[in-house]
Amino acid sequence: MPRLIGEFDVAVVGRGIVGLAHALAAARSGLKVVVVDRHARATGASIRNFGFVTVTGQERRDMWPLARRARDIWAQVAPRAGIAVLQDGFVLPVRRPAAAAVLEAFMQTEMGEQCRLVSDAELRRLDPDTPFMPCEAALVSPHELRVEPREAIPLLADWLARDMGVTFAAPASVIACEPGRIVTGAGDYRADSIFVCPGDDLNALFPEVIAEQDVTRCKLQMMRLAAPGWRLARPVMSDLGLARYEGYSALPEAAALIAQLRAEQGAQLDAGVHLIAVQSADGSLVVGDTHEYGEAPDPFHSEAIDRLVLDEFEAVLGPAPQPIERWVGVYASSPKQNWFTREVAPGVHVTVVTCGAGMSTAFAIGERVVGAAIDAPMKEIA
């Protein structure tokens, strides 16, 4: 007879940001929640990213409103969980007239609300401590925030346990989920509602559902650069981001820019390079990133691909400091959609973010999924 470890209203499988977001939403409904994972802490994509909660540039119809809501939840949660918000907003300086035309078109949409399009001279007055290379124009957004993910995710879990009453189970592999029950190698958990948030673990639970959504994996490379001796007032992106982020790339004006980028920076596009640069509390810079797709991407870091990232960094911010740390991240990816949720059995739901925007949208996705699945009022975060 399997050993029953505990009985809960809600069980969440996965303690990455998507799982924690579901746990928070359930806890806000006053429910008894347990989080089950094979690891004692998050080790995957949730801690191997920029911690950059990106609103501006997200896909217009669904992701942009989700990111706006998730950003507001981050702003509420961070001070309660002791998570430092290291930077606010972001700036996207561009060096091509075709890129400036995309930004001008973007500003005519509702997504440009509260953003500013500034000249090179205005950007230098706005951020005098950042050594920008000459630009054609720059988009400045107030909407984003940035945390240190390797610190923020553990602090978020600690806060959920301490102040929100969430139970974190001892590490155990989940063998099966069925209505009302999770089976692990250590024993069983009973729960009325189960939310499976597997990240890039595509084969363990409900692999047929994940396969139906054309989910594969995306490998990215990131670096930490030594403190440069100057201040990055806000996260920075570049022309390549206009080809990467759907909020820009779906605009008609983006076609000419993408053709120009293909002609001038084809190697970067082939490697999925687009620049994000953020600054940590110690002054060091976190820089990336890249995108390589496949069922089983290799775990090795490519110096040549890092060089493509650094070339773009230097085109925007001048000479790059020495890399002092490098890492590889892997996340679930699909060309079919940016995220999905499915009820795979009565009371059992699978939710996967498939575009690398978990930090930017998970809190809102968890709120939406749990709210739709559970008939219980959800309180504001106290």
Image (cartoon, rainbow, N blue to C red):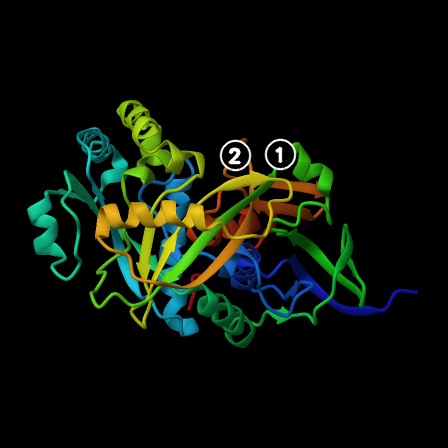
The amino acid at mark 2 is Gln
Residue drawn at the location 60% of the way across and 45% of the way down: 297
Comes first in the chain, label 2 or label 1: 1
Measuring from the top left, give residue 243's x and y in whole percent: 35, 33
Q: Disc 1 on helix, strand or loop?
A: loop
Which residue position holds label 1?
213
Assign the C terminus to one quadrant of the image: bottom left
Looking at the rendering, which quadrant does residue 209 occupy?
Answer: top right
Q: Say what secondary structure mark 2 lies in.
A: loop
Q: Is residue 381 shown above or below 82?
A: above
How many residues crowd around disc 1 within 10 Å: few (fewer than 14), some, or many (20 or more)? some
Q: Nearer the viewer, residue 139 or 73?
A: 139
Q: In the image, is residue 16 above or below residue 115?
A: below
- The residue shown at (28%, 55%) is 235
Tell me, yes or no, whether the two marked residues, 2 and 1, touch with CB atoms within 8 Å: yes
From the viewer's perspective, is 192 left or right of 234?
A: right
Q: Quadrant of the N terminus?
A: bottom right
Name the residue that disc number 2 marks. Answer: 337
